Image (cartoon, rainbow, N blue to C red):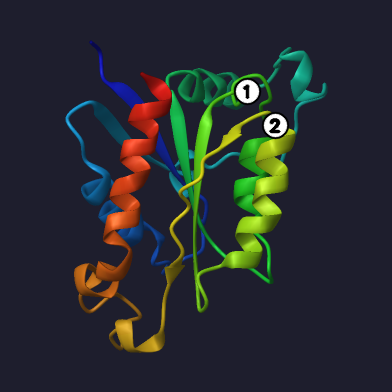
Amino acid sequence: MENKKIGIILGTNRPNRIGPSIANWIKKTMTHQSLTIDILDLAEIDLPFLDEPEIPAKGNYKREHTKKWSKLIKQYDGFVLLYPQYNWGYPAVLKNALDYLYDEWKNKPVSLMVYGGHGGFQGLISMKLVTQGLGMYNMSVNPPLSISKDMFNESNQFIDIDSSFEPIKTQVKMVSQEFITLLN
């Protein structure tokens, strides 16, 4: 049986961000023999602000960057949306990337992993409404990624990400198991 493909969509493009370190830790922690996991970094994908002339539900894409984004997303069986909580919400770059497409998201399972000072609970709630509106399947395991100043060095990078996130390691592994259960 072919491995199921999971995309970790890194939903932040801020300079000097901690998101790539967290995405790599999640990928390493979620590793399972029946899953292929990729990181889709929205800072690298670099979609402009939504510029399609028609609504995404029609699927009549005109812009090359949209066609490329659609083709990429269609390759995946499920997603982890990884993002920081911004003002009790989510970053605009993530919402923009989701809004570009419609059918490509439909019925695909999604786990929301939000990081913030208190785990990003409000950002998770607001994104659940968006993923529900896109027809995605909101998974039951959505590990909260609580961060605190003592986890970082003077360059604002993790001192030891493994020990920082040890308390939620089991939950992140449960995300892998939920994907396997849902997709097989």
- Point 61% across, 39% down: residue: 97
Q: What residue does disc 2 label?
A: 134
Percent position of residue 132, x then y: 69, 37
Q: Is residue 165 above or below residue 109?
A: below
Give the quadrant of the C terminus.
top left
The 10 Å Cα crowd at callout 1, few under 14, some 14 to 19, many 20 or more, is: some
Task: Please name the residue shown 33% across and 64% down the image.
Answer: 168
Q: Is residue 139 above or below residue 135?
A: below
**Residue at position x 21%, y 74% in the image:** 163
Visible residue check, residue 48: no
Report which residue position mark 1 lands on: 106
Q: Nearer the viewer, residue 129 or 149?
A: 129
Q: Dot 2: few (<14), some (14–19), or many (≥20) neighbours within 10 Å?
A: many
Give the quadrant of the N terminus: top left
Residue 94, above or below 117? above
The tag earlier along the polypeptide, 1 or 2, is 1
x%, y% of residue 83?
A: 51, 57
Q: Residue at the location (66% across, 47% down)?
A: 128
Q: Secondary structure at mark 2?
A: loop
